[in-house]
Amino acid sequence: MSLARHHGGATIAFTFIAALMLTMLPLPDWAALFRPEWVALVLIYWCLALPDRVGVGIGWSTGLLLDVIKGALLGQHALALALVAYLTLHLHQRIRVFPLWQQSLFVMLMVALNQMLVLWINGVIGQSPNSWLYWLPSLTSMLLWPWVFLILRDLRRQFRVR
C-alpha cells in the first residue's frame, strides 16, 4: 500500500471530531434523552465505506476520547465502540448491499449493543439508569441513519476519500 493511494484522512478525522462535538453539545434535559450516538453512527459509516482504513483501532481511540469527554470510566466506551467496529467490519460486505431501511435496523442493533455494554459496565460500578428512556438513542440513531449515510457519502465523494 502506498501513501498516494489513500486520500482524505483529514476528512475522516473531521467527521469524528464533528461527532464528538455533537455529543458534547448541551441540550435541555428532555432533548438529551433523544441524543443519537453520533460517534457510533460515524464509526459504522466509515467501517462500511472504508473497512481497510477505519477499524477497531479507530473505534477504540474515539471511544477513549468519548470516555474523557463524558467523564466516564476510562475504557468503557472504547470497549463498546471497538466491538461495534469489529462486528461492522465482519459483516460489512453483507450490510453494504442492504437498502437504507435495513441498514437502519442494523445500526439500531449496533447502537443498542453499544449502549448495553456501557450499561453493563455502569451496572458493575453501581451507576444504573433510572428508566427505559435510556434506550431512546438507539431509536433516534436508527431514524437518523439514512441522513447520516447520505451526508457522509456525499462528503466522501466530494473530497475523494479512498
Image (cartoon, grey):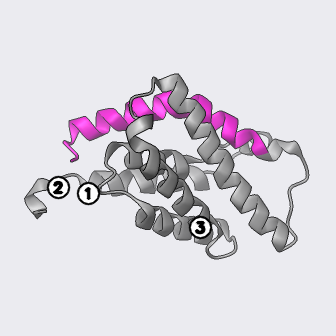
Q: Position of residue 161 (x, y in %)?
A: 23, 46
Task: Give the quarter of the figure containing the N terminus.
Answer: bottom left
Instruction: Residue at 69% x, 70% y: name it.
Output: 72
Q: Secondary structure at mark 1?
A: helix
Q: Which of these two is toward me, 64 or 80?
A: 80
- Answer above or below: position of 2 versus 101: below
State the separation of the CA atoms marked 2 and 3: 27 Å
**Dividing the picture into quarters, in which one does residue 132 lie?**
top right
Look at the image and give the residue range highlighted in magenta: 135-162
**Dividing the picture into quarters, in which one does residue 83 lie?**
bottom right
Q: Secondary structure at mark 3?
A: helix
Q: Which residue is mark 2?
A: 6
- Answer above or below: position of 47 versus 156: below
Query: Looking at the picture, which amino acid does disc 2 mark?
Result: His
Q: Which residue is mark 3?
A: 79
Q: Main secondary structure of the magenta part?
A: helix
Q: Position of residue 57 (x, y in %)?
A: 42, 67
